[in-house]
Amino acid sequence: MRFIVNTKGRNDIIDITPQVAQIIENSNIQEGVALVFVPGSTVAITAIEYENGVIKDLKKILEKIAPENDNYEHHKRWGDHNGAAHIKSALLGADFMVPIEKGQLALGRWQQIVLIDFDERPRQREVIVKILSEQNKKS
Amino acid sequence: MRFIVNTKGRNDIIDITPQVAQIIENSNIQEGVALVFVPGSTVAITAIEYENGVIKDLKKILEKIAPENDNYEHHKRWGDHNGAAHIKSALLGADFMVPIEKGQLALGRWQQIVLIDFDERPRQREVIVKILSEQNKKS
Amino acid sequence: MRFIVNTKGRNDIIDITPQVAQIIENSNIQEGVALVFVPGSTVAITAIEYENGVIKDLKKILEKIAPENDNYEHHKRWGDHNGAAHIKSALLGADFMVPIEKGQLALGRWQQIVLIDFDERPRQREVIVKILSEQNKKS
């Protein structure tokens, strides 16, 4: 399954838990795992408490790790300006796995699945959800 | 399957390889993948050589990335003090996937699965292990 | 399935997408997920645009996060010099999940799967690929 997320870019952090939960519900799976994945090299998937303060804090620390306005080698190569975006995507990862128990996402109470778009401009992203069923192999 | 881990918080790093290995053994799975996941937004799962020196080094570098005593926006919002914990959890991730080969975890010799609790106080954490079977689709 | 990668160590970043794609093709799987995993505690798997400039930028930022020549506690313990390698491996992770759609890796256009060897010397690494099939559970 795929769904679309429109982002503003520049470290835009978007809660995609409702869309993932809906896909799980529609699948009728009871026990298993969902892969949440975003194709793209300037974007990531992770989990965080989706609270305004934490969101600002995360952006600030990501900016400290890989500042947007540094002189990246990547900029010289292509003339674009999203070098920091590539770094942050590689550090956080485009993949996130979440368990499904009794037909529900087994997340913590304050743990939301988020897409972070590091690109320097608004983007339309497609998120892929793959559902894997757990089999009881115990004899 | 779930198992419980009691932590001291404050970057406590705990080797959970034995518990995961036991669950794999009990499952009788031969070839597949295990998802090791911790519900919670101030905790993470990763792998590292579980050696005292490395453990100290990792804590030091995580403290450099997101110092516990910075002024986080999250603190203003809720009056709590675990802003750094949320950041570190989002950076490291609550999910870890490990292959199973011939009924065993296919880890490196010095590679242990660890839970890191970033919260500012002792916590009781539940770790979820989901087991997925590899199927030979080759015709 | 396993395949071998020879590295130069010292943050050597190697595009392993062709090998993973070949294994997917050989498996005849149509819809599912592949786990790409490297056993080892001084090595990682992630995705990045495999472009010379970005590769240099990533190495520079990883060196900023965990400089190779710092005084790591790990060095005192064993007399070796790869403390930074262990840290970077734990931060980036040895596991990467990628969806398979219509028999193909569902990566972004500029998104390649890479192995990064942080060790201080050339290494021969074995990469494990596990293939999981998605089942349509919808009734």
Image (cartoon, coloured by chain):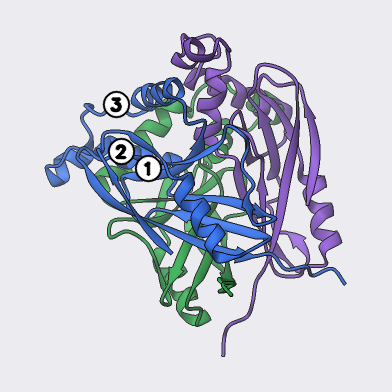
Chain colours: A purple, B green, C blue
Residue C17 can be seen, yes or no:
yes
Instruction: Tell me the distance, in whole angstroms, between the alpha carbons under discs 2 and 1.
Output: 7 Å
Q: Chain of mark 3?
A: C
Give above or below for C1 relative to A65: below
- Residue C30 or C116: which is nearer the viewer? C30
Reading the image, the residue beneath label 2 is C118
Badges 2 and 1: C-beta atoms under 8 Å apart? yes
Local packing at callout 3 (Cα closer than 10 Å; few below 14, some 14-19, many 20+) is: some
Q: CA distance from mark 2 to mark 3?
A: 11 Å
Q: In the rendering, which numbered label is found on residue C67?
A: 3
Q: Residues within 10 Å of mark 2 (few under 14, many from 20)?
A: many
Q: Can you name the residue that lies furthest to the bottom here?
A: A139
Q: Residue at x 52, y 56 (%)?
A: C35
Give, as a three-letter code, the residue at label 2. Answer: Phe
Which secondary structure, mark 2?
Answer: loop
Q: Given the image, on which type of amino acid does mark 1 rest?
A: Ser
Q: Earlier in the sequence, mark 2 or mark 1?
A: 1
Q: Are marks 3 and 1 on the same chain?
A: yes
Tell me residue B45's x, y (percent). 49, 51
**In the image, residue A27 lies at what x, y percent?**
82, 63
Mark 2 vs mark 3: in front:
2
Nearer the observer, A6 or B5? A6
